[in-house]
Image (cartoon, coloured by chain):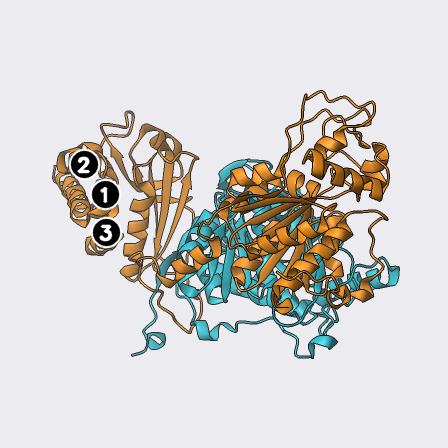
Chain colours: A cyan, B orange
């Protein structure tokens, strides 16, 4: 019997371990990072596994350097990743912007702990969701994925690499400390069935290569450094040759293409889950561990006769605003449960645009949201005292 | 190396990017020509050559050369170059940085690149100022010299970049200057030929800001001053301090030598990393992942579920005990989750493991309706005794937790640490005693499955001792219930 045909076995796997395993299965061969709780298990797993696979794991002097090394490795053709938590994520922001502008595929894992500042290093939060969208300066598109279970950490880590390669963009994998450290029973899929995506590389003659000339999906084929296509990469505004430019038309065209490449392919990127939404009077919007609490709360509320559903974004950026708008209708209310002082709730309000009242249930004390928190939020909503 | 006086530089330039942005009289163009002569003279394969730079006047040079080129962020070119080189060790990677880029905002990366001895060549063009932003004070501005942010003359000491890199472990350290361009060729060629981190500080000149602010003349005068002191004092930065009316509060400036200042052989980073891959570390004893084409675990209906909370002090092995329980449950065909809560302490503090064992799907992987609580310390009892379901099974260390309830049908005060002490001669292992008691008092997981998990993980390095502690816990529970 070949290993691939061996009977599947369950494993008890930690979220951070699942992330590392998925990265390796998706073809990640370069890891650079700096130790920080609660993400360090990812670095340890990658450091143990990568050398035997012909890859490299390196501990850099800080998170700025980690992100720089990831971008350098990706330009050399390697699938590359780093993992961190809040303070380190803050330090990485400049290079995330560089990756967005120079269109360098990479995956950044942010295992969210309570902040701001050093905060509660071992405690969960969901305080970085807006930072994932707008943490770096300037207009830029970004993708951020939000798994809610160990199995989904695996699935969405693979997807993060696939999206990064397909769209030449940084992809942020955002999950809280509970999801990072919880162990759950999973059966990982066969590597052959993962649908691993590789970046499109140029096939033209080197002399004809224009490093920022887009293909039909708005994504320029990318040449590895040292592959015979001599070209320039810069964080300055650039033309299709990659040369710096201040020409307003060229600069505008670049910005429009960068945003359009995700916007035009939005349907392929956005992902969410709905549970018991069809007949719901109240729809809970939650993600990460908060969605797990909400799932239990929805089951308890349903058992008590209340018509409650769950809308769970699996991709936070681009935000599933059109999908939320579709379910917002007269007589229905929306409760956003999240582990921060109110971040995604503003996006939900923007999405439903007044078509349904929106309330928030927030927790920012370093403790995970519980089913009781969500139930309390539902009760407040029923009394009308929680409406924003 | 062959000197190539007739070299046609255009073959290495992106002529369609001209005109360049450098000011008349700037020394950086002189440096670029020296780099190209060195590259040409060594016959390096241009397809495998990558120029990396940061932000600043000198960093703009990489745009004008027809190699792969990477113009990164301010201060960080060495970080990008490190990733490039580690991912593609066959590439020649040349980093061009400035004194602000490499010594101020990027100083940390410089010392670490030197320490790692990664095979990069770093050329730091030192013009003693921030030229691109208008002549502000730099970490290389000699004391007393004027800048746009220190108009009365800077009072801070300046870096000796070569001493810094040498101190950090750089294996090739040299200094040259734009007034001696042919000498530069040689230094750069030697740096490029060096295996390991090679560093060349190149004294350049900025007539537009540093020269103008300090009355040093234009390019020719500044070069002439370099040349004069190359012959006389071997120290350009001192020269820049010999200005009319400028005092030096820091006292005499140490002379700065030029030429190759340090050269040694030391193992190179990417080679060492690759060598490690060729001889993989011994396997960690974990089973290879089993794979199933059906995808991540699917959903089942919520059915019988048991929430177990194990609590004690950090270092007692609480999280490990929970992990063994969850592993045993999965091996026994159940669904299980294991979550943990802990403080910053590796030893002491409060520690908590939460295990949920279920026949079906587990919606929420933290315990909030607790069926089983084990508490080994008073703090654990006080913090975690809440959220118990009516009739919950409680196991506490009766000798350690004053105020814990007396034993009754579902509450058990047991001498857990004392049992570990008796059986193993140390309280370390109390986690396994507690686990044994828990397993005996509940039917959540078969004892045999836990024993298999213990044998697999060998906590404390000895499966035999661990199993002894576990079985002592089972005995303890049996004894208590017989009483």
Q: Chain for mark 2? A: B
Vertical relation: A183 (above or below) B90: above
Pointer 2 and pointer 3: residues touching (CB < 8 Å)? Answer: no
Report helix, strand or loop for mark 1.
helix
Q: Earlier in the sequence, mark 1 or mark 2?
A: 2
Q: Chain for mark 1? A: B
> In the image, is A60 to the left or to the right of A165?
left
**Which of the labelled discs sits on residue B420, or is there none?**
2
Report helix, strand or loop for mark 3.
helix
> In the image, is A317 to the left or to the right of B476?
right
> Quarter of the image holding residue A240?
bottom right
Q: Are marks 1 and 2 on the same chain?
A: yes
Vertical relation: A137 (above or below) A78: above
Disc 1 designates what residue? B432
Residue situated in front as seen by the camera: A356 or B36: B36
Pointer 1 and pointer 3: residues touching (CB < 8 Å)? Answer: yes
Q: Earlier in the sequence, mark 1 or mark 3?
A: 1
Q: Earlier in the sequence, mark 2 or mark 3?
A: 2
């Amino acid at each position: 019997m070949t290993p691939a045909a061996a009977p599947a076995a369950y494993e008890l796997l930690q979220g951070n371990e699942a992330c590392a395993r998925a990265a390796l299965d998706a073809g990640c061969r370069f890891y650079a990072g700096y130790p920080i709780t609660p993400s360090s298990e990812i670095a340890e797993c990658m450091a143990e596994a990568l050398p035997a696979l012909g890859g490299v794991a390196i501990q850099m002097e800080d998170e700025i350097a980690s992100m720089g090394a990831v971008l350098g490795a990706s330009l050399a053709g390697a699938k590359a990743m780093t993992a961190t938590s809040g303070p380190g994520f803050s330090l990485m922001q400049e290079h995330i912007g560089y990756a967005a502008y120079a269109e360098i595929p990479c995956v950044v894992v942010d295992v969210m702990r309570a902040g701001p500042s050093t905060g509660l290093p071992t405690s969960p939060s969901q305080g970085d969701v807006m930072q994932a969208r707008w943490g770096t300066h300037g207009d830029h598109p970004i993708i951020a994925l939000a798994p809610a279970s160990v199995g989904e950490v695996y699935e969405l880590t693979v997807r993060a690499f696939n999206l990064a390669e397909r769209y030449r963009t940084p992809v942020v994998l955002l999950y809280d400390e509970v999801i990072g450290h919880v162990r759950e029973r999973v059966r990982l899929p066969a590597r052959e069935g993962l649908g691993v995506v590789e970046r499109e590389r140029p096939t033209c003659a080197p002399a004809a290569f224009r490093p920022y000339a887009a293909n039909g999906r708005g994504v320029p084929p990318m040449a590895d450094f040292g592959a015979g296509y001599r070209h320039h990469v810069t964080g300055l505004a650039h033309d299709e040759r990659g040369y710096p430019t201040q020409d307003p038309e060229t600069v505008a065209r670049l910005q429009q293409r960068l945003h359009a490449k995700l916007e035009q392919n939005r349907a392929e990127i956005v992902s969410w889950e709905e549970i018991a939404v069809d007949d719901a009077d109240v729809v809970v919007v939650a993600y990460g561990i908060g969605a797990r609490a909400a799932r239990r709360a929805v089951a308890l509320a349903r058992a008590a006769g209340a018509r409650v559903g769950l809308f769970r974004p699996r991709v936070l950026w681009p935000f599933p605003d059109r999908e939320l708008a579709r379910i917002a209708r007269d007589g229905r209310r929306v409760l956003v449960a999240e582990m921060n002082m109110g971040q995604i709730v503003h996006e939900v309000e923007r999405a439903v645009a007044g078509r349904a009242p929106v309330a928030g249930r927030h927790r920012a004390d370093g403790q995970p949201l519980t089913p009781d928190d969500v139930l309390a939020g539902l009760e407040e909503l029923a009394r009308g005292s929680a409406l924003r | 190396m062959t000197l190539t006086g007739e070299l046609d530089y255009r073959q290495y330039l992106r002529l369609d990017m001209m005109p360049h942005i450098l000011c008349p009289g700037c020394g950086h163009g002189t440096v670029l020509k020296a780099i190209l002569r060195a590259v040409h003279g060594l016959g390096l394969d241009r397809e495998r050559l990558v120029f990396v730079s940061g932000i600043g006047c000198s960093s703009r040079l990489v745009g004008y050369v027809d190699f792969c080129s990477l113009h990164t962020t301010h201060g960080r070119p060495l970080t990008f170059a490190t990733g490039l080189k580690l991912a593609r060790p066959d590439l020649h990677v040349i980093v061009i940085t400035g004194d602000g880029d490499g010594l101020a905002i990027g100083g940390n990366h410089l010392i670490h690149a030197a320490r790692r001895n990664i095979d990069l060549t770093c050329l730091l063009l030192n013009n003693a100022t921030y030229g691109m932003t208008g002549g502000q004070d730099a970490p290389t501005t000699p004391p007393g010299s004027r800048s746009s942010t220190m108009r009365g003359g800077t009072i801070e000491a300046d870096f000796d970049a070569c001493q810094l890199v040498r101190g950090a472990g750089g294996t090739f350290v040299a200094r040259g200057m734009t007034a001696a361009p042919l000498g530069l060729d040689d230094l750069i060629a030697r740096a490029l030929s060096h295996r390991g981190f090679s560093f060349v500080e190149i004294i350049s000149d900025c007539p537009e800001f540093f020269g103008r602010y300090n009355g040093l003349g234009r390019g020719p005068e500044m070069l002439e001053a370099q040349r004069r002191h190359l012959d006389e004092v071997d120290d350009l930065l001192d020269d820049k301090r010999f200005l009319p009316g400028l005092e030096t509060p820091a006292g005499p400036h140490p002379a700065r030598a030029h030429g190759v200042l340090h050269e040694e052989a030391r193992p190179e980073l990417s080679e060492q990393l690759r060598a490690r891959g060729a001889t993989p570390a011994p396997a960690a004893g974990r089973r290879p992942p089993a794979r199933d084409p059906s995808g991540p675990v699917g959903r089942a209906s919520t059915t019988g579920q048991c929430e177990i909370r194990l609590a004690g002090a950090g270092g007692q092995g609480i999280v490990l005990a929970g992990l063994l329980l969850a592993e045993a449950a999965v091996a026994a065909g159940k669904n299980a989750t294991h979550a943990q809560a802990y403080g910053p302490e590796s030893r002491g503090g409060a520690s908590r493991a939460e295990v949920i064992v279920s026949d079906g799907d587990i919606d929420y992987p933290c315990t909030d309706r607790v069926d089983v609580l084990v508490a080994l310390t008073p703090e654990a009892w006080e913090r975690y005794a809440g959220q118990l379901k009516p009739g919950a099974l409680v196991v506490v260390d009766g000798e350690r937790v004053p105020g814990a309830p007396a034993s009754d049908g579902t509450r058990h005060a047991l001498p857990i640490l004392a049992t570990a002490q008796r059986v193993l001669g140390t309280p370390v292992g109390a986690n396994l005693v507690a686990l044994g008691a828990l397993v005996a008092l509940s039917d959540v997981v078969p004892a045999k499955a836990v024993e298999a998990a213990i044998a697999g993980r060998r906590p404390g390095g000895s499966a035999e001792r661990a199993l002894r502690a576990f079985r002592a816990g089972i005995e303890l529970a049996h004894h208590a219930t017989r009483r």
